[in-house]
Image: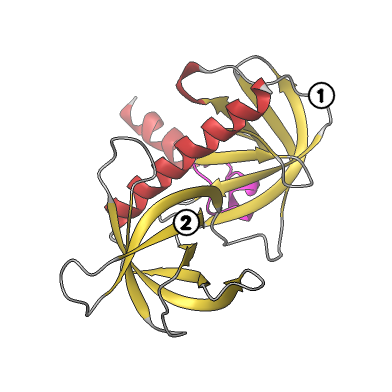
Amino acid sequence: MGFFKSLLKKVSPEPEKDQFLEDFPDLYSGMKVEVLTPANDLIFVGKLRILGGGVLEVRAEAGGYLPRGLYNQPVKLRAFQKDGTAFTMDGAVGPNGYDFWRIERLRYLQNSENRNFYRQSIGGEGWVYPITSAKGQRFPCQILDISAGGCRVLTEKLFELGGSFQLETSLLPGEVPFNITCQVKRTQVRAKPGSPVKKFEYGCQFMELPPREQDRLMQSIFTLQRKALRARRDQ
């Protein structure tokens, strides 16, 4: 009997690989995803589940309810990696319910939308200070938008293009402040006509942000995103 079992084990066919996963090597169940319209308007944020055969399921977070989807409705999926980077797919809505959407006919978008960070508009307040400045020398700033990889900051303090500064801010009430090193990638001068006061808008890239802090930042951004979406629905 042991001989026959051994023989059966040898001739048993290996399970077929899911070609869909071969084409989308970055996908895994539990990923955070945004479901968007083709025009990039946010519909909802959820978690991914791979069903196989080229079909994905997006579940509502924390038992929440989802808007009703239309069968064959075109959508985009923006999936976020553990390091905060993202890639984009498009597809069509299949069967769906109050807590899940199935997405079919997926296609990987090979364009500039991939590998970018999602930027959340916030208009929050914070502080900037030169890395080499004396302790306590800091300047108020307004954070126009932020992602896991960078931000846009408006302040009266002048920094050189390519230079660095520290950004201190909290995105949510009661949150432990973030303290992030930023490198200036773009600069734009803002001034009101007739006013001698100038402000500087900086497009910044985050430098040496530890993975744990980047994950905490992503969670805060998603929380802001959900609040903005809820407020839009309540209007």
User: Residue 195 location in percent, x, y?
Assistant: 58, 72
Q: Residue at x 45, y 21 (%)?
A: 62
Q: Residue at x 81, y 24 (%)?
A: 70
User: Residue 166 location in percent, x, y?
Assistant: 30, 68
Q: Residues within 10 Å of mark 2 (few under 14, many from 20)?
A: many
Is 216 displayed left or right of 31 in the figure? left
Q: Which quarter of the picture shows residue 66? A: top right
Is 23 displayed left or right of 80 in the figure? right
Residue kind at label 1, given as amino acid type: Leu
Residue kind at label 2, given as amino acid type: Ile
Q: Compare residues 146 and 139 and report the one nearer the observer.
A: 139
* In this view, the mark in front (2 or 1): 2
Q: Residue at x 49, y 64 (%)?
A: 154
Examine the rendering and report whether any part of residue 47 can be seen: no
Q: Residue at x 15, y 70 (%)?
A: 135
Q: Compare residues 5 and 87 and report the one nearer the observer.
A: 87
User: Residue 84 location in percent, x, y?
Assistant: 45, 54
Sooner in the amino-acid sequence: mark 2 or mark 1: 1
Per the image, the residue denoted by label 1 is: 70
Q: Compare residues 96 and 183 and report the one nearer the observer.
A: 183
Q: Residues within 10 Å of mark 1 (few under 14, many from 20)?
A: few
Per the image, the residue denoted by label 2 is: 143
In magenta stretch: residue 86: no
Q: Residue furthest front?
A: 194
SS at circle 1: loop
Magenta region: 13-28
